Image (cartoon, rainbow, N blue to C red):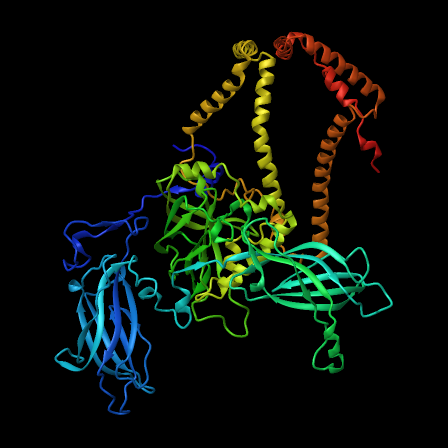
Amino acid sequence: MHSGNPRQAHHNDDQDDYNVKDTNPDLGERWPNGGAYGGRGWMSGGERFTTTYDLVEQMFYLYVRVVKAKDLPPSSVTGSCDPYIEVKLGNYKGRTRHFEKKMNPEWNQVFAFSKERIQSSTLEVFVKDKEMVGRDDYIGRVIFDLNEVPTRVPPDSPLAPQWYRLEDRRGQGKVRGDIMIAVWMGTQADEAFPEAWHSDAAPVFGEGVQNIRSKVYVSPKLWYLRVNVVEAQDVIPNDKNRQPEVFVKVQVGNQVLKTQICPTRGSNPIWNEDLVFVAAEPFEEQLYLTVEDRVHPSKDDVLGKINLPLTNFEKRLDHRPVHSRWFNLEKFGFGVLEPDRRKEQKFASRIHLRVCLEGGYHVLDESTMYISDQRPTARQLWKQPVGILEVGILAAQGLLPMKMKDGRGSTDAYCVAKYSQKWVRTRTVLDTLNPKWNEQYTWEVYDPCTVITLGVFDNNHLGGGEKTGTAPTRDSRIGKVRIRLSTLEAHRTYTHSYPLLVLHPHGVKKMGELQLAIRFTTLSLANMIYLYQHPLLPKMHYLHPFTVNQVENLRYQAMNIVAVRLGRAEPPLRKEVVENMLDVDSHMWSMRRSKANFFRIMSLLSGMLSMTRWFGEVCNWRNPVTSVLVHILFLILIWYPELICPTLFLYMFLIGLWNYRFRPRHPPHMDPKLSWAEAVHPDELDEEFDTFPTSKPQDIVRMRYDRLRSVAGRIQTVAGDIATQGERFESLLSWRDPRATSLFIAFCLCAAVVLYVTPFRVVALVAGLYYLRHPRFRSKLPSVPSNFFKRLPARTDSLL
């Protein structure tokens, strides 16, 4: 018999679907019977365990390394040979590139065939001659029995390739030519795995082959470039009849900043302003500086310029000042077309600069809320690592189709993980909604209060790049997971399945699940204690902090530089992937996020409200036993005041021990309820996904503007109430209300005398008993201090 509300049951199922789930994968490397086929593996009997890949499930592959061939026969028609190799295993075929007119070609290419998909007991390696017209000529072949293939286990040395004489088509005799091949059975731990041609990637061609391989990337080394514009001398305007309004414009790459217009007009302006840029090694851009005159609000005259390479500037590790230098400015427009003005080189305007590359800062390219690295730029300032983070990217389950292929939904998924300066990208598993990667990666950890980000994407670059004349193809996001290292217990392996949640214009959607195995190993408890006592960011962020606007602008520039540099790698880590991993749009306005943050504040205040409500019940004697116990505790603390602090800390200690039973059993994950993504209004989502500036019609923009005004009106009211209470406190002694101030200072004098002559215990006892008095002795009207405070004047009556 079933009972209950089916809609409520369905809602609970959805909630469970959004939660992290425990998994029990078969982790570690196991080698039964010394190998995968027969007993040819060079290992002792039984099972062998290794720890190289102990956070992933083992995947067996048949590897075929085609090294080279020699003494191949020429074609009877052309008199030459254009050889290539075809490796065939059951229904799978892989081929090397062909060489033109070469009898002794070298390929050095590796083919990998998944053991799960092997449907044949023999491996055939064909040598063929490429023909321009008609069928390619057959030269010879070599056949391997898979039962005789040895098994290799890293860290054993690679299997040495051997020469094999080619056989004819029927296998009845040898033919001219030899081929050097190595065939072995291994796992994804083999060093040949990342660069191998995989049988499940046979449909990929051209440059797409590079785009499906697993790779490790390193973010460029970023520096803050601080340009302190001190002053200029002998600045001559183009119009000699007016005093110039001079400012300095500095450009580094795509970054352009300007100083303020010098307040004192003249030929020797002084600014002493700092302009901060982001630069990346190797330094490809130059610092381009111009001194300009504001002739008109829409027109600026360039009075001088200078180009400076970034390699000329000093690298500063701390807050000590760097030496300033004078630079001669080139006259703008002076060149080969104006030979009559060359004499002007003898007299040049000068500018006084103090420029340095800041090595004591950490260049922020991520949001500080989920930062993955906090080390300063200069390697000399790095501390020793405090731990090791190991992540096994196992698989994804139940992915949604991202594109149509042959009339059906398909997904070509790969996973990207970003922690510190190291990015990893798994190989792309083609045409499956349940891809298995089983790739393991390791990071050094310098601070546990950091976050690792993992994203799953759909590869749309399998055909060798974008088509000409069409819009650039973008890899689609499937979902993202963030895990804070400080929430992980040390030396414990976490194996969980994380929901991949994405917010779409029509609501939150689960795109599948990502299965991970994570282990955080700490190296020293003393280092951990040391870290928790020190600031998160390097000390320069506190000695010479940036403004909030500077931090946001510099972070945006740093993200652009990282995206451009990683996009130039081979294969590229594309811009849309980097921006999604770095949360490029986290600063944009969102009504949904505003509501989520408001309710986060309310949930924090709810604890204090609960304590206030409980204390009110004690004062009102709702539970006489509790009220009596509180009175007894109060009297003990009054009689022995030295027990107040020990009691407080002991109470917090006991609460912490009690809460240990209810500690989280799994790492945190994306919570749609906390994000206020489940009950969000569709128009609010549409506004969140709108472009900046907006691209919506005028009536929709007006409606949203009115809604924003109403929300801002409520915020304005709350802010006004807070200001009113603060101004009432100020007016106690400001004589704004002479009578109220007179009464208050008279009360203060009387209180000072009474507190001086009365022991503190007596005062505390009387005040406490008065506050805890029985409801029979209470009045329902507001108290005297409350009445007095509410009568105090605020400055609201002075507002327009």
Vertical relation: 618 (above or below) 449? above
Residue 99 in the image: above or below residue 428: below
Residue at the limit of the structure toward the front, as seen here: 346
Q: Name the one closer to the observer, 105 or 721.
A: 105
* Left or right: residue 78 compared with residue 228: left
* Residue 789 visible in the picture: yes
Q: Residue at x 43, y 50 (%)?
A: 512
Q: Residue sitting at 59 percent across and 30 percent down?
A: 605
Which x, y percent locates residue 411?
42, 60
Residue 306, image x, y percentages:
67, 68
**Residue 329: where, in percent of width, then height?**
70, 68
**How many discs mark residues in the rendered view?**
0
Residue 511 drawn above or below residue 718 = below
149 sits to left or right of 474:
left
Along the viewing direction, whichever of 11 and 616 lies nearer the viewer:
616
Identify the image quadrant of the C terminus: top right
Q: Quadrant of the N terminus?
A: top left
Q: Is residue 686 visible?
A: no
Could you say where residue 37 lies in the image, as x and y percent from the top left? Answer: 18, 59
* Residue 63 located left or right of residue 408: left
Q: Specify the quadrant of the image occupied by residue 254.
A: bottom right
